[in-house]
Image (tube, rainbow, N blue to C red):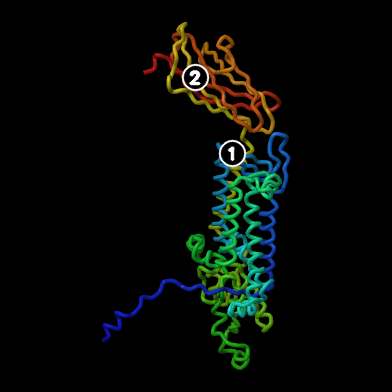
Amino acid sequence: MKMDQSLNLKPASLYAKREPVFNRRIDGRFRRLKWAIMVICLAIYWITPWIRWDRGPYAPDQAVLVDLAHRRFYMFGIEIWPHEFYFVAGLLIMAGIGLFLVTSAVGRAWCGYACPQTVWTDLFQHVDRFFDGDRNARFRLYKAPWGPAKIARRLGKWSVYLAISFATGGAWIFYFADAPTLHQVFWSGTAAPVAYGTVFVLTMTTFVLGGFMREQVCIYMCPWPRIQTAMLDEKSLIVTYKDWRGEPRGSVKKAQKNPEAFGDCIDCNQCVAVCPTGIDIREGPQIGCITCALCIDACDRVMSETGRPRGLIDYATLEDSEREKAGQPPTRHLKLIWRPRTVLYFAVWAGIGLGLLFLLGARVHTDLTVAKDRNPPYILMSDGSVRNAYTLRLRNMQGRPRQMEIAIEGLPGAKMWSDDIGMEEAARTLTRTVPADETQSLRAYVVVPAGTASQEFTFNLRAMGEEREQDSAQAQFDTPGVE
């Protein structure tokens, strides 16, 4: 009989049904910090495409622009070309190391304050409070049966969600084209289909992820919390509940009757009520904690109201918590942040940044690449001379047309001409005007006298005018003597 009962047992479910989070409004220094960072992040995102930057008459005047059509990336006074992608790679590496630095110093502060998922979720939670009230009112509405009042509130709130999401997707496409022009053609219905498709996709993802999934994205979808866990150690500043001070928990009345038997925590659950992910920080570090520190604001207020010292929940390292538990004074936060690990991260981060700045300052705005024709490798002329053909790419990286001179260095007796110049006008130099911010292709034919051996030579490119920048490229000249 026991065997039959065991066979009928259902396996334990590995899926945890989502419990909606109705976080309470709180005021405090960390909440005000979140407000400030949210406003700054949203302002940067929505305003940046509309900022103008004068680059002259031949370049776009949008301050930040990813010009995919012409394969350019503009950021204020910086212009990145496709062959300079190492600048973008360097910025991405700096961003990664910057996250390592922040995590090592103050835990998941990126997740708690500046992550796009956090910023938009926080914004949507304020919309919730506007339509549905604070925590208790929202919980009652959630439990209430569907009726005209509830449907009206939901439709109103979701409409605002959709408007915010649409503004999010709409702002994104302005980074890839001139914002005023795209804005005009978008609303006239004449923009490219990819613009409408991109706005639709980003609108729906923002609407779903920020409006409904929220903390589920942080806990289950995002890989970053799991990566961060490996970067935290006993010296990392994280939001910590000091159990040695708060336990055992007891209400204010119980503590008044027997103060020696209870800790400072009065089990009010305010730290849980304000948490945007719905966790209980008193259970220790966990993947759902995004280090937003709102629980610190809530707990500090309760401690102040009950006449207890603040800091029951606070930013602290595990090492420092042990020090405080032993009765020693806490270490200053600045000293905890500046330790060998964070200094090393900062040094690598700063070193890459300085290297990129050096490369940016040292780069020239003239570039030359040469590709030799492989088939045929050479052509014998009627007079016995030998001709090789090359494709030269002259790059003008300035916002104005420039006259450039191409010259042959080495290869004695050699002359060259191009498709628009006859062989009778061949010389050791050619002159071309390259338009602003463009790469010009040039077919060059180089001829040498009979009997010349195969050898390497150099094409030199020199920009005429005030900034006499130059570049060079090695090339091979083949003759019949080559195996």
Q: Where is residue 438 shown, x and y percent of the image?
A: 62, 31
Quick check: 295 above or below 428? below
Q: Where is residue 339 shown, x and y percent of the image?
A: 56, 60
Quick check: 222 above or below 57? below
Left or right: where 427 falls relative to 306 = left
| Nearer-the-camera pick, 131 or 374 | 131
| Nearer-the-camera pick, 213 or 285 | 213
Query: Is label 1 in contact with label 2 (beta carbons under 8 Å)?
Result: no
> Circle 2 is placed at which residue position?
389
Quick check: 228 above or below 374? below
> Circle 1 is placed at which residue position?
71
Q: Secondary structure at mark 1?
A: loop
First along the sequence among labels 1 and 2: 1
Residue 351 appears in the rendering = no
Estimate how packed mark 1 is, as few (under 14), some (14 to 19) or many (20 or more) residues with alpha carbons within 10 Å: few
Q: Secondary structure at mark 2?
A: strand
Amino acid type, callout 2: Ala
For the residues marked 1 and 2, what is the alpha-carbon distance in whole angstroms?
A: 28 Å
Residue extending farthest top: 383
Residue extending farthest bottom: 257
Amino acid type, callout 1: Arg
Residue drawn 57% across the image and 14% down it: 428
Left or right: where 27 falls relative to 69 = right
| Nearer-the-camera pick, 280 or 357 | 280
Q: Where is residue 387 shown, x and y percent of the image?
A: 48, 14
